[in-house]
Image (cartoon, grey):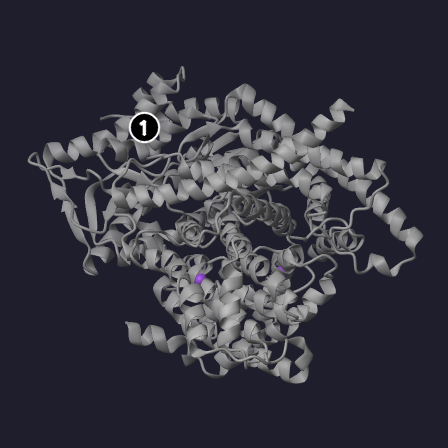
């Protein structure tokens, strides 16, 4: 049970980190504009960090989005079928989704590992480690997979209707 | 049976280097009728330019044409092409080409067919006339140049500040003076209409483009001996002819710019030498700093200054 | 090798089936991409390449306005600044039925001039305007339609990164193309206003009626000065800083966000709670959108790799047609490809074939560029795979269906088609301004 609680914390904590990284992006770009025009010391890292934050925030929030039904899905057509069919199809959707993003997590992990071993560098406005982006994806996709599985095991349905503010 | 290679280009098909490559493919197809054929299936709309060398290494596409510096993060030795001042005929003759070919096979898992070099230099283009120092060199202290990971070290050595500007923002940025200039090949400037705002060109140019043709080794291995020979032959011919064509093209474009009122900031003598040396040094120092065991050998084979 | 129509059927058919079964849109793209690369590129290597391409699709600085404009919109909403603007305008234009729908077009047009990004624009307007307008009794369709529509204005009214890329790829004068978009963009905004007026005439219940109470001039002016006028600072932070050369169009989104934050601070509306809520709302929509962009960008690459896109282009342009029939064929290709592919890829695929045809048929290239931008803009709002539709669905309240979103956008899609017709009849709508600016 402690493990489950820890897991929940990770899902929420990552989403919070994703949100925080967007705040960092805003501040960095504003600093960049100000420094360029006021002659302050510029930060070469800005554009590299912003670019990485785009993928990081996406992958960090994606598992939480699964949990709150935040990834858009279309339900109009399947809703026309009998309830039992809807349920069955939804089970299948969850299973396929979990397997697919699970595979993507494994493959991302493999590329990341190889890049880590070979010391590949991603040359942006500053040099960053090549494995980093793949680590983001491996983590994001893996936790998306466990979130889809969690829904499946708890008998919940994915509705994609989480667009509430 | 006829060998068929499906090839990409790192730049969109409307780019003039891509069009040169299509002429290369046509020449191969002409000479290799019934033996070997290169199908140019597209550009970055299929695999993003930066990721194409990886795609060839994985064997998901047979062949691509683009800058070797796109793989610099995995193969520091790519800087040998970036920092070279010799033409591809010379470096093929002296064994430089074979050395890069061998390193690329080991680290990137690709077969390099040619250092396909539209090898005319880049130039610095500026919105305003730069101040001169007493020794005749230009003073770029505090000037904002559009950043490029390849040339940032050189710009910084000139006292300039590299600023990151995405390509679609460059036009508006130059129009509004958000930054002061950039280093680019002339022919590419023309396509973006940036010459409308860039009123000064610094001569001499520096460095050269680092384009090459890459083939998946597994595919290369399945080709008939005859096919390989035709590909290599045509590649060597184009290495030579395209080198000259491109220098002429660059000259023509720069002459057009001048006719439209672009001014030349001419560096002379020691100032010119120091400027070009700084560009080369930044590249060769980076190769040295990478710890590559081939750094010294490559410098000896690719660099004459 | 599969024929192009077989590849098309496999990729697009598979995607449709997955989506109709209720698979999250982003995951549906990823699954069909995996199947596609397995068949076309072969095995695990294909999936590796898919992921490699995916990193490139999302880690692009030009996408930064997506989260930035979202934060700006969320801050406007959660700080109450947006409601202040609405209340003041309600008092001012109390007699005009559907005033906030008109405001959407007005505000949307302003933000379109600011941003080059339709998706950022739609997401921002959707998350700012929609909750409040629904509370005030507007029907969903009259809220969503104008938002999707004005989002599309972003790429035709300058600055527009898409116009710059088009100009370069097609060797059209970039400056002329940017300026040429201004009048058609404003005409389109007027067409939107006319459409809203018509919709309210047909269905008066769509927008709340007249407010019975009248307000003193002092009250009205006070509201305008206190709540609406300061928004000029936000607009200055975005457009003004671009014009002054302080910020690039991409960076200006961050400047606008800063301006909103400063205003909220001055009005004592910027609490920790507001900031947290705004970031939470932003990451939710931005991650949803970027995940779809990750899937759909790689999908267009696979579609191009399979030869399906090239097959369609070659087929449609292979007939011996009159000038306007050929133009129509090109538009149809753009709209069909636009349903499934991202706009930059479409341009790279079609321009090498279209531009020689444009020259052959003696159309003006700048004029054609504007028509092409309109068709590309349209593609973002056309079902089944219009990204703006997904964005709208993502920011709309619980229970909103795709059908509602699509119906809401139809009248405005027609406006764009009308504009294309107008441009064909009166090319000077686009060409006059560049000709006098020379
Ligand atoms: Na715009
Ligand atoms: Na679309």
Q: Is residue B158 visible?
A: yes
- Residue B22 is situated, as x and y percent measured from the top left of the image, at 47, 49
**C396 versus B21 height, above or below:** below
Answer with left or right where residue B28 lies relative to residue B272. right
In the rendered image, the quadrant that contains the C terminus of chain B is top left
Of residues A153 and B67, which is closer to you in this image? A153
Looking at the image, which residue is at 19% across and 60% down?
B259
- Residue under pointer 1: B283
Q: Residue furthest top?
A: B293
Q: Where on the image, by quarter, is ligand 2?
A: bottom right
- Residue B255 is situated, as x and y percent measured from the top left of the image, at 22, 54
- Residue B211 is situated, as x and y percent measured from the top left of the image, at 41, 38
Q: Is residue C364 visible?
A: no
Q: Secondary structure at mark 1?
A: helix
- Residue C342 is situated, as x and y percent measured from the top left of the image, at 57, 55
Answer with left or right where residue A141 lies relative to residue B55. right
| Numbered marks: total | 1
Looking at the image, which residue is at 79% across and 35% down?
A150
Q: The residue marked by circle 1 belongs to what chain?
A: B
- The quadrant holding residue B66 is top left
In the rendered image, the quadrant that contains the N terminus of chain B is top right
């Amino acid at each position: 049970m402690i493990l489950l609680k820890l897991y929940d914390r990770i899902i929420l904590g990552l989403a919070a980190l994703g949100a925080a990284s967007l705040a960092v992006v805003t501040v960095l770009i504003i600093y960049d504009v100000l420094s360029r025009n006021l002659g302050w010391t510029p930060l070469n890292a800005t554009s590299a960090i912003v670019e990485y934050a785009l993928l990081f925030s996406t992958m960090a929030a994606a598992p939480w989005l699964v949990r709150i039904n935040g990834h858009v899905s279309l339900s109009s057509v399947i809703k026309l079928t009998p309830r039992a069919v809807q349920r069955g199809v939804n089970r299948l959707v969850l299973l396929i989704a979990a397997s697919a993003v699970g595979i993507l997590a494994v493959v991302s992990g493999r590329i990341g590992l190889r890049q880590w071993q070979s010391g590949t560098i991603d040359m942006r406005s500053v040099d960053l480690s090549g494995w980093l982006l793949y680590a983001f994806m491996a983590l994001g996709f893996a936790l998306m997979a466990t979130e889809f599985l969690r829904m499946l095991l708890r008998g919940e349905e994915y509705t994609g209707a989480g667009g509430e503010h | 049976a006829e060998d068929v290679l499906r090839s990409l280009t790192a730049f969109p098909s409307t780019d003039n280097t891509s069009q040169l490559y299509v002429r290369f493919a046509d020449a191969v197809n002409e000479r290799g009728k019934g033996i070997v054929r290169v199908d140019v299936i597209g550009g970055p709309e299929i695999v993003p330019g930066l990721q194409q060398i990886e795609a060839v290494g994985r064997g998901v596409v047979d062949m691509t044409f683009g800058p070797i510096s796109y793989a610099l993060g995995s193969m520091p030795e790519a800087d040998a092409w970036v920092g070279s001042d010799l033409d591809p005929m010379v470096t093929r003759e002296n064994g430089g080409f074979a050395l890069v070919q061998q390193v690329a096979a080991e680290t990137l898992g690709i077969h390099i067919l040619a250092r396909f070099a539209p090898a005319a230099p880049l130039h610095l283009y500026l919105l305003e006339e730069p101040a001169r120092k007493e020794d005749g060199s230009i003073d770029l202290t505090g000037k904002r140049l559009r950043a490029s990971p390849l040339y940032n070290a050189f710009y910084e050595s000139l006292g300039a500040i590299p600023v990151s500007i995405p390509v679609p923002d460059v036009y508006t940025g130059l129009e509004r003076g958000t930054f002061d200039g950039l280093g680019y090949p002339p022919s590419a400037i023309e396509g973006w209409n940036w010459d409308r705002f860039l009123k000064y060109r610094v001569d001499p140019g520096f460095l050269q483009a680092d384009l090459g043709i890459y083939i998946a080794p597994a595919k290369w291995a399945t080709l008939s001996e005859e096919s390989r020979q035709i590909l290599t032959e045509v590649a060597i011919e184009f290495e030579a002819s395209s080198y000259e064509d491109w220098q002429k093209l660059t000259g023509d474009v720069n002459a057009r710019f001048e006719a439209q009122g672009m001014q030349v900031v001419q560096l002379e003598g020691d100032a010119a030498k120091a400027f070009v040396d700084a560009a080369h040094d930044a590249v060769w120092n980076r190769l040295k700093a990478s710890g590559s065991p081939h750094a010294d050998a490559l410098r000896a084979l690719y660099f004459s200054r | 090798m599969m024929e192009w129509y077989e590849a098309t059927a496999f990729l697009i058919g598979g995607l449709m089936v997955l989506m109709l079964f209720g698979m999250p849109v982003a995951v549906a793209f990823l699954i069909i991409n995996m199947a596609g690369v397995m068949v076309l590129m072969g095995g695990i290597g294909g999936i590796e390449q898919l992921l490699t391409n995916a990193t490139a699709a999302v880690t692009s600085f030009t996408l930064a306005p997506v989260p930035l404009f979202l934060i700006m919109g969320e801050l406007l909403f959660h700080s109450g600044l947006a409601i202040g603007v609405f209340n003041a305008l309600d008092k001012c234009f109390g007699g005009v039925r559907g005033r906030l729908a008109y405001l959407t077009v007005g505000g949307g047009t302003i933000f379109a001039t600011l941003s080059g990004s339709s998706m950022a624009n739609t997401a921002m307007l959707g998350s700012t305007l929609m909750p409040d307008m629904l509370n005030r009794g507007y029907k969903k369709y009259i809220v969503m339609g104008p938002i999707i529509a004005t989002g599309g204005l972003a790429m035709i009214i300058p600055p527009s990164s898409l116009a710059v890329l088009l100009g370069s790829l097609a060797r059209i004068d970039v400056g002329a193309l940017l300026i040429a978009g201004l009048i058609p963009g404003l005409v389109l905004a007027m067409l939107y206003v006319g459409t809203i007026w018509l919709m309210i005439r047909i269905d008066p219940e769509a927008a709340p009626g007249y407010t019975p109470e009248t307000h003193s001039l002092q009250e009205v002016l006070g509201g305008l000065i206190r709540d609406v006028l300061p928004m000029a600072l936000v607009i200055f932070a975005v457009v003004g800083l671009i014009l002054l050369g302080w910020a690039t169009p991409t960076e200006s989104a961050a400047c606008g966000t800063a301006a909103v934050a400063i205003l909220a601070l001055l009005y004592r509306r910027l609490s920790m709670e507001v900031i947290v809520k705004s970031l939470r709302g932003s990451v939710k929509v931005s991650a949803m959108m970027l995940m779809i962009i990750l899937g759909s960008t790689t999908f267009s690459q696979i579609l191009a790799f399979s030869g399906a896109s090239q097959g369609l282009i070659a087929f449609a342009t292979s007939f011996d047609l009159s000038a306007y029939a050929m133009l129509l064929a090109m538009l149809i290709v753009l709209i069909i490809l636009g349903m499934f592919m991202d706009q930059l890829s479409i341009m790279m695929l079609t321009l090498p074939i279209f531009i020689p045809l444009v020259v052959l048929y003696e159309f003006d290239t700048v004029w054609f560029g504007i028509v092409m931008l309109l068709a590309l803009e349209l593609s973002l709002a056309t079902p089944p795979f219009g990204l703006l539709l997904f964005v709208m669905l993502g920011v709309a309240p619980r229970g909103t269906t795709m059908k509602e979103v699509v119906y809401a956008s139809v009248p405005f899609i027609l406006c764009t088609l009308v504009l294309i017709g107008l441009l064909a009849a009166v090319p000077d709508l686009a060409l006059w301004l560049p000709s006098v600016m020379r």
